[in-house]
Image (tube, rainbow, N blue to C red):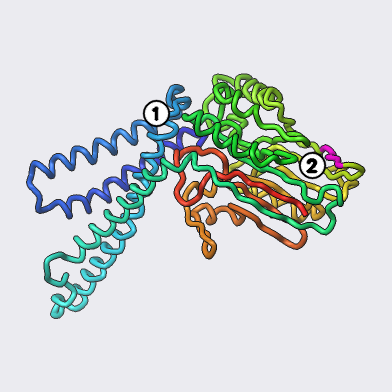
């Protein structure tokens, strides 16, 4: 969304969608009083106009870019309304196509045109489809509002992973994996503290963080330094960068300001006591046994996500270790580069997708819209001896909530 023209295109699509949905609104309100219709019309287009206004202002107004209320709630409501209208429009399109075929039929067979007309009764098919579309769209929007209450509902997920080549000294190693903190979205210190307490209660040997500490700016961590600096483990806390950490999604007064922001963010990791891995690897030791921990900058194979990561710098020298863990923010890196070029990387840890913060998960079924873009989007994936774990994210961004996909603290035990 770095190009302001993109926002204008989105705004135009929103207005077209608003006009289309409004045709259904007019149909279902045809029998109400004129005063009520006027009120509904004014309210509908006022919300639409405000949505477009805020959307078009975002690239140019610094206050909106840093406002938690806008970035969390206003933007989420705008997006929620858009998707609700989009869902409803599916049924409006079905009805429009139905009526089109009926009209064509009446022209081809004029003598039997009556058979192509709507059946009589208390409600026409068009009104039925309009109510159905509006009802399902409203249900989606209500679900998204409900999801606001789940954004700090941290879920502990415990995973045991077996590897034939894991050195004996590392058998039973307990790792806490977290990702996507997005501190710029937080507004409840007590809730975040509870999440950090949950992490520390696991008494992990090692804590690994796979990127997106902030939404855009290093200052977003100012109010949460005293919480996240509590994270500690006997073997250390290690971290890497995600796509949001580079400040690519906001307007900066200069390239130097953007560069300085990134340098300050690196210092934040250091002040937290976290070892930030920047296209490098380090050995981890237990007794006489050693394994390699590799960390790269963000490398994404999807969309316009940046490729700052350099495996050709991080990997050389790691081949001497019998077991390797890679921290790489974006899970698309696994299929695109890790598996074909580095088959001896045993475990890759990622985040990035958040599971879209929306979906369905149960023992029998797992679904989220994000799977249309990411093959690996939440949980454990295996290919031969290689494993990938995608954390669902500790924080949130864009939509200040969770529906079906809860914020995650992963506890991994190696065996």
Q: Is residue 36 above or below residue 165?
A: above
Range shown magenta:
282-286
Relative depth, front residue between 409 and 269 = 409
Q: Nearer the viewer, residue 109 or 174?
A: 174
Q: Are marks 2 and 1 in contact (CB under 8 Å)?
A: no
318 in the magenta segment: no
Q: Mark 1 highlights which residue?
A: 57
Residue 120: image tag: none
**Residue under circle 2?**
293
Residue visible at 69% across and 49% down in the picture: 412
* 225 left or right, relative to 80: right
Give x and y (percent) for residue 191: 50, 34
Q: Please tell me whether residue 271 is drawn above or below residue 27 in the rendered image.
A: above
State left or right for residue 382 relative to residue 367: right
Looking at the figure, which quarter contains the C terminus? bottom right
What kind of secondary structure does the magenta stretch mostly adopt? strand
The mark that comes first in sequence, 2 or 1, is 1
User: Dot 2: few (<14), some (14–19), or many (≥20) neighbours within 10 Å?
Assistant: many
Label 1 environment density (alpha carbons within 10 Å; few <14, some 14–19, many ≥20): some
Q: Residue at x 76, y 57 (%)?
A: 162
The answer to whether any part of residue 284 appears in the image is yes
Where disc 2 sits, the SS reads strand
Quadrant hosting residue 306:
top right
Q: Which of these two is toward me, 113 or 241?
A: 241
How far from the left and from the top, in percent, is residue 347?
74, 51
């Amino acid at each position: 969304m770095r190009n302001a023209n993109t926002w204008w295109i989105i705004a135009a699509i929103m207005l077209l969608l608003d006009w289309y949905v409004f045709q259904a609104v007019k149909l279902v309100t045809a029998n109400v009083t004129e005063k009520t219709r006027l009120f509904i019309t004014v309210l509908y287009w006022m919300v639409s106009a405000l949505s477009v206004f805020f959307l078009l202002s975002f690239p140019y107004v610094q206050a909106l870019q840093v406002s938690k209320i806008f970035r969390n709630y206003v933007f989420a409501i705008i997006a929620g309304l858009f998707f609700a209208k989009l869902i409803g429009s599916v049924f409006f399109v079905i009805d429009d196509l139905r009526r089109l075929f009926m009209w064509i039929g009446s022209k081809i067979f004029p003598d039997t045109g009556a058979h192509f007309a709507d059946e009589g009764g208390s409600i026409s098919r068009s009104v039925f489809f309009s109510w159905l579309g509006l009802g399902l769209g409203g249900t989606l929007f209500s679900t998204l509002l409900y999801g606001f209450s789940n954004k700090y509902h941290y879920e502990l997920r415990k995973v045991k992973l077996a590897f034939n080549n894991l050195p004996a000294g590392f058998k039973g190693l307990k790792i806490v994996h977290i990702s996507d903190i997005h501190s710029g979205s937080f507004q409840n210190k007590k809730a975040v503290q509870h999440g950090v307490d949950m992490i520390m209660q696991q008494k992990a040997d090692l804590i690994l963080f796979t990127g997106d500490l902030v939404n855009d700016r290093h200052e977003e961590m100012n109010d949460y330094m005293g919480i996240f600096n509590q994270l500690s483990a006997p073997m250390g806390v290690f971290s890497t960068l995600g796509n949001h950490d580079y400040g690519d999604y906001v307007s900066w007064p200069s390239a130097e300001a953007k560069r300085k922001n990134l340098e300050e963010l690196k210092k934040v990791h250091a002040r937290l006591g976290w070892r930030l891995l920047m296209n490098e690897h380090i050995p981890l030791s237990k007794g006489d046994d050693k394994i390699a921990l590799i960390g790269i900058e963000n490398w994404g194979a999807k969309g316009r996500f940046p490729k700052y990561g350099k495996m050709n710098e991080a990997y050389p020298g790691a081949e001497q270790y019998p077991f390797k863990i890679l921290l790489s923010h974006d899970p698309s890196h696994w299929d695109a580069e890790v598996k074909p070029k580095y088959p001896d990387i045993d475990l890759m840890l990622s985040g990035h997708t958040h599971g879209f913060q929306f979906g369905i998960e149960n023992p029998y079924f797992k679904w989220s819209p994000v799977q249309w873009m990411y093959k690996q989007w939440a949980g454990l994936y295996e290919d031969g001896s290689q494993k990938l774990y995608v954390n669902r994210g500790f924080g949130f961004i864009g939509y200040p909530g969770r529906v079906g996909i809860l914020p995650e603290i992963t506890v991994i035990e190696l065996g």
